[in-house]
Image (cartoon, rainbow, N blue to C red):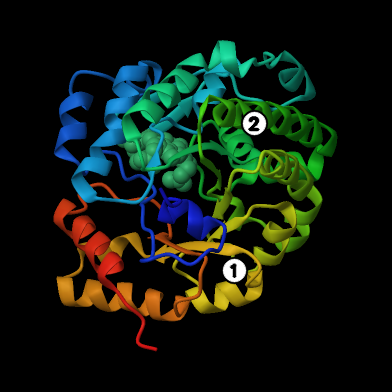
Amino acid sequence: MSEPRFLAACRRLPTDATPVWFMRQAGRYLPEYRAIREKCSLIEICQRPELAAEVTLQPVRALGVDAAILFADILLLAISLGVGLEFARGEGPVLQNLVRTIEDVRNLRSVNPEADLGYVMAAIKILRNELKDIPLIGFCGAPFTVASYIIEGGSSREFLRTKMMMYSDPQTWHALMTKLSGVLTDFLLAQIRAGAQAVQVFDSWVGALSPADYAAFVLPYSQQVLKNAEATGVPVIHFGTNTATLLPLMKEAGGSVIGLDWRIPLDKGWQVIGHDLAVQGNLDPAALFAPLPELRKHVHDILSRAAGRPGHIFNLGHGILQNTPVEKVRAVVEMVHEYRIDK
Ligand code: CP3
């Protein structure tokens, strides 16, 4: 059998149609997910491999996407590090033992992914048996984005405490980033060994930084995670938002595919990155609430900017929003698969 189109596109090989999947394709916009969530917390779903596998498969069945992304969360690692994690109703993540000093960094537990996050690898093994010819994507957070949660205690707008650690106490910052990049590398490699056929590194909030700060405080740590994953030979997707000015540095950090958000036109972003890498993106998640003709315009605009060049994976510029109409998501899959460039 020929290589699945998602994996082929990651390697910039021509495909019969543009592959498509969605960040946060599992989740609350799907009624079958909500039915499980009524009985179990988010963390429980993640920690029960059969449930995590089931929830991973739901969007594959409902949408006809070209890849599955493992159902887990970038913050599960906080549990293993001894930080503690809760998802408060309607408030997003709440972390407990926050890291503010060098002592706090030293007190973080050492993590053995196979032992401490074994439930993630167990879900991957179940999924590889069930998925047949749909590739499975594993993932982790990038060191900066994970650090920001462990320092701030939850989602943040200004990242003030995070930046204050960089600027006022660089020794603690670099110690934390060294710790996180080591653990994240081990975690990603464990997922690949368990059977993940591609991995994505989520640096969702890195666009809060200037290029100079990214280069000084983040790049070497992301590079460690990305390059070690790339060395295994599986495609590595490097994703962030608000990254228009960071793209050249993100390329330097690593990844065989760079994720683009909707704030930059796809052709422009691809040009900045260079056509020697693949790109993923970049529909505005809000466009999924638009009437079909408007939605189609957005989808076709992105595909025409990709211009039939091998190495484009269609996705959103960030995750699917709550209350997104499922039929619109399904319609996008069809639009992408049916699209043909007029040569
Ligand atoms: O379908 C998939 O994409 C796979 C599963 C997945 C989840 N989280 C499950 C989840 C993935 C890939 C993530 C990554 C993640 N988690 C990121 C990076 C991607 C991004 O969106 O920027 C971040 C920043 C997190 C941290 C996180 N988890 C936040 C801020 C929240 C609360 C926000 C919200 O939407 O409520 C979560 C909760 C979370 N993780 C949900 C899901 C499906 C929400 C649904 C629920 O509570 O049941």
Q: Image quadrant for the C terminus?
A: bottom left
Q: Along the horizontal axis of the image, is 9 left or right of 28? A: right
- Splitting the image into four quadrants, where does ligand 1 fall? top left
Question: Residue 203 location, x and y as percent?
Answer: 58, 47
Q: Quick one: 256 or 168, which is closer to the camera?
A: 256
In this view, the mark in front (2 or 1): 2
Three-letter amino acid code at disc 1?
Ala
Q: Residue at x 71, y 41 (%)?
A: 231
Q: Secondary structure at mark 1?
A: loop
The residue indicated by pointer 2 is: 184
Residue at position x 64%, y 74% from top? 272
Residue 217 versus residue 329 in the image, above or below: above
Label 2 element class? helix
Q: Position of residue 45 (x, y in %)?
A: 32, 21
Q: Is residue 22 left or right of residue 9?
A: left
Dot 1: within a 10 Å radius of its alpha carbon, few (fewer than 14), some, or many (20 or more) residues? some
State the residue lying farthest toward the right: 171
Q: Amino acid at mark 2?
A: Leu
User: What residue would you read off at disc 1?
Assistant: 244
Q: Picture quarter containing residue 124?
A: top left
Q: In front here: 42 or 306?
A: 306
Pointer 2 or 1: first along the chain: 2
Query: Residue extending furthest bottom?
Result: 343
The image shows residue 80 at horizontal and vertical percentages of 57, 16
